[in-house]
Image (cartoon, rainbow, N blue to C red):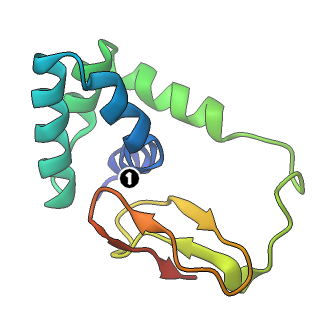
Amino acid sequence: MSKAEREVLTMLCDGLHELRQECAGFPDDRKALALIEMEAVARRPVLELFADLLDMRSEDVLEKQRGIATGLPGAGGGRADDEVFGCPDSGCDNRATTRPAGEPPWCALLGRHMRRL
């Protein structure tokens, strides 16, 4: 998987719940998002499909992702490493944290618990 596809998959996974809500009232967008999810689960390229859904150029989608991802070093939540979870099959770079001894977060795209990193 290319770096660009991995980045857009991370963006998709991180915002999937909101995307589903946003597309709920628009049948064409719901259908486009369903196709994107199906392709993403199969780990096929989704960058162009995602850009079409957002009505953006693929380069702009990636630039937006990179802008969102930047932050100040050390400004995170300060959770222990054993409380960090990632994509169940390492397909994206999405990360989630839980409270100590909490249940692992759920991957909305794959429908499985995320794996401890």
Q: Residue at x 34, y 14 (%)?
A: 56
Vertical order, 31 against 74 (above or below): above
Q: Is residue 46 left or right of residue 82?
A: left
Vertical order, 62 against 15 (above or below): above
Q: Quadrant of residue 18?
A: top left
- Closer-to-camera residue (100/110): 100
Q: Residue at x 42, y 26 (%)?
A: 61
Q: Residue furthest right?
A: 74
Q: Residue furthest top?
A: 55
Q: Quadrant of residue 87?
A: bottom left
Q: Is residue 113 left or right of residue 41?
A: right
SS category of the residue bearing label 1:
helix
Q: Position of residue 13 (x, y in %)?
A: 40, 50
Vertical order, 86 against 22 (above or below): below
- Closer-to-camera residue (80/102): 102
- Total labels drawn: 1
Disc 1 designates what residue?
Answer: 6
Q: Position of residue 47 (x, y in %)?
A: 27, 36
Query: Which quarter of the figure is the C terminus placed in?
Result: bottom right
Q: Position of residue 49 (x, y in %)?
A: 19, 30
| Residue type at numbered disc 1 | Arg
Q: Is residue 102 left or right of residue 76?
A: left
Q: Residue at x 52, y 78 (%)?
A: 104
Q: Residues within 10 Å of mark 1 (few under 14, many from 20)?
A: many
Q: Position of residue 9 (x, y in %)?
A: 36, 49
